[in-house]
Image (spheres, helix red, strand yellow):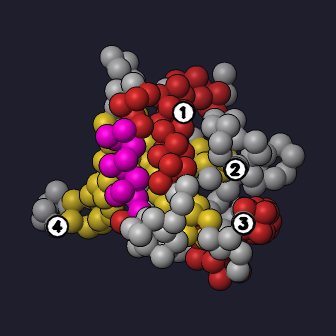
Amino acid sequence: MSNQGAWRAAFPIRPATEAVEAIIEGWTSLAASELPHFNPRTREEKLTKALKIQVERDVARRRGLLGGWTAENVIGTVDPSTGEITEQRRTDISYHWNDAHRSMNLVFEFKRVGRGKGHRDHYLGANGLERFVNGIYSEGESVAAMVGILLDPKDEVVPPLRQMLEEIDQSGPLQLRKTPAGQSCIDPSGLFANAQFELLPISWTGSGVN
């Protein structure tokens, strides 16, 4: 079995899929109409905190999800010789799950993206997907999800974003592994039916899904 096949076989896909579906249901419910405190102008951290609470208190309970949810969870690294925090980040939403044999910390990181090139540059750049892939957001984990909050119709946002990903140099900051067909994106995703596409950064043994 290949390394890729081995981690797919070991990854707890069912609880991960349940968590993804719960996030989608929670977002769909809150975004069904423009609410005073949940709308395109609301700050991202307020959107994700509200979403986490809605999912944890309602959706996950109805669906019988047994894992734990966190929002704005602090992660980082500490220099053991000085006690100094050398890197610190906050994850938007995380779903923590384990059984007697496996554990998972599935991170969902949210970022606004619209139809303009500036939006795509920001989404993919040093403060977006690049930091997500090369940082510590899912250190040691096989899968993480970068979630695009679409500010314009999907057909005006996703295809140009996909095109930019296909044009990215493999030796660049994202270091995306190509598929056998020579593409950067796996579409449809082999992990989550609701994901637009899946990426395989060289630095990961797993996947990033969008």
Res. 139 visible in picture: no
Which stretch appears magenta? 47-58
User: Pointer 3: what residue?
Assistant: 153
Which x, y percent locates residue 172?
A: 66, 68
**Amino acid carrying mark 3 in the image:** Pro
Residue at 30% across, 66% down: 87
Figure quadrant of the N terminus: top right
Q: CA distance from mark 3 to mark 2?
A: 14 Å
User: Pointer 1: what residue?
Assistant: 17
Q: CA distance from mark 1 to mark 2?
A: 14 Å
Q: Secondary structure at mark 4?
A: loop
Residue at 61% across, 48% down: 209
Above or below 164: residue 92: above
**Of the residues under marks 4 and 1, which one precedes in the sequence?**
1
User: Pointer 4: what residue?
Assistant: 84
Main structural element of the magenta stretch: helix, strand or loop? helix
